[in-house]
Amino acid sequence: MSQGDSRPRQPFLRVDSLTSGYRQVPIVHDVTLEAHRGELACIVGPNGSGKSTILKAIAGLLPPFSGTVTLDSRDVTGCKTPELVRAGMGYVPQVDDVFPPLTVEENLEVGGYCLDARRIAERKDAVLELFPRLTTMLQRHAGRLSGGERKMVAMARVLMLEPSLLLLDEPTAGLSEELATRMLGTQLRRLTDAGTAVLLVEQRAALAIETSDWAYVMGSGSVRYSASTAEIGADSSFGHVFLGGAHSPEAESDPALDL
C-alpha cells in the first residue's frame, strides 16, 4: 500500500512480545511488530541490534522463549518453517539462499515443489515477469551467478508459492545504490500493490525508510521506535536521534545485474 492510500490496513503478521535467541540465550527481547497486507515494512538499526535474529525467529528457525506469532489470525508460535510456508510465509535469508549446483530454472522448480506441472509453469512465468533478467540465465548454475543475481533467484524461488507474507533479510546486499533503489522501490512495490505483506531487514536505513510504509528501529535486541515512514520523514531529528546521523555505505556495484 503506497503512502496516501486510503484502504484499511490489514495485518497478516502479528508478533507480540517475542523473545528469542540461540542456545537458550535471549538475543531479542519483547519484540512487537506487524506486517500488513499491501504494505512494505522495514526493520533498521545498527549491526548487532537483533534485526536478523527476529526475522529468523518469525520464520521458525529459532525457538520462541516467550511471546506469540500470529499469521492471518492463526497462532503459529513455535511452528517450524515448512508449516509456516504452508500458512503463507516466504523467507529469503541473507546467505545460503539458493541451491548452487542447480540451474536457475531448477531452483525455481524446487521453489514450487508442491505445485503441479501446469501451476509451476504459470508461476515461473509470473516470477520471470517480475525479474526479467533471469530469463536469459535459466540454464546457468546458481553457483556461478553474481551475488545480486543469486538474490534475484532466491526471491523468485520463494515467490513460486505466491506467499502472502514475504520476509527478506538484507535483500540489497551486494547491489549498487541504483539497483537497490529499483529493487525496494519497484520490484517489492509490485508485490505490495498485489496485496503481499513484505517485512525486510535492511542495512541501507535511509533507502529502506524512503521506500517503505512503516519502519521499526531496533537497538540492543529491542524495538526502540516504530512509526509510519510519513511520520519519520516529517521528523528532521530522526536520523540523528535513532540512527546516529549515519547513512549506510553504498554496496559494491554488481554490473552483471539488471533487475
Image (cartoon, helix red, strand yellow):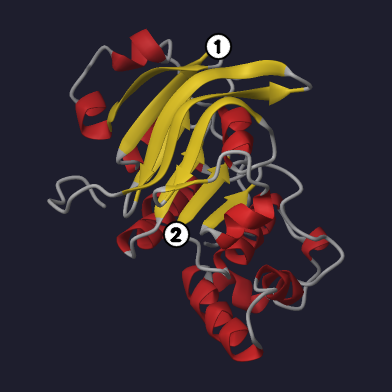
Asked if marks 1 and 2 touch (Cβ < 8 Å), the reply is no
Q: Report whether residue 251 is seen.
A: no
Q: Report whether residue 131 is seen.
A: yes
Residue at far bottom of view:
118
At x 69%, y 57%, the residue is 150
Residue at far front of view:
75
Q: Toward which corner of the image does residue 26 lie, by quadrant?
A: top right
- Amino acid carrying label 1: it is Ser
Instruction: For mark 2, give the secondary structure.
Output: loop
Q: In screen coordinates, is 142 left or right of 4? A: right
- Amino acid carrying label 2: it is Ser
> Is 193 in front, or is 19?
19
User: How packed is label 1: few (under 14 Cα within 10 Å), some, or many (20 or more)?
Assistant: some
Q: Which residue is mark 2?
A: 164
User: How packed is label 2: few (under 14 Cα within 10 Å), some, or many (20 or more)?
Assistant: many
Q: Does 134 sit above or below residue 236?
A: below
> Which sits earlier in the primary sequence, circle 1 or circle 2?
2
Q: Which residue is mark 1?
A: 220
> Is 194 in front, or is 187?
194
- Indicate the position of residue 108 as horizontal and vertical percent values: 67, 72
At x 49%, y 77%, the residue is 126
- Indicate the position of residue 37 as horizontal and vertical percent values: 33, 53
Q: Does 109 sit above or below residue 188?
A: below
Q: Does 192 sit above or below residue 62?
A: below
Checking the image for residue 67, the label placed there is none
Instruction: For mark 1, give the secondary structure.
Output: loop
Q: Toward which corner of the image does residue 216 lie, by quadrant?
A: top left
> Is 226 in front, or is 183?
226
At x 34%, y 42%, the residue is 211
Q: How many numbered discs, if any?
A: 2
Q: In screen coordinates, is 145 left or right of 29? A: right
- Indicate the position of residue 141 as horizontal and vertical percent values: 81, 68
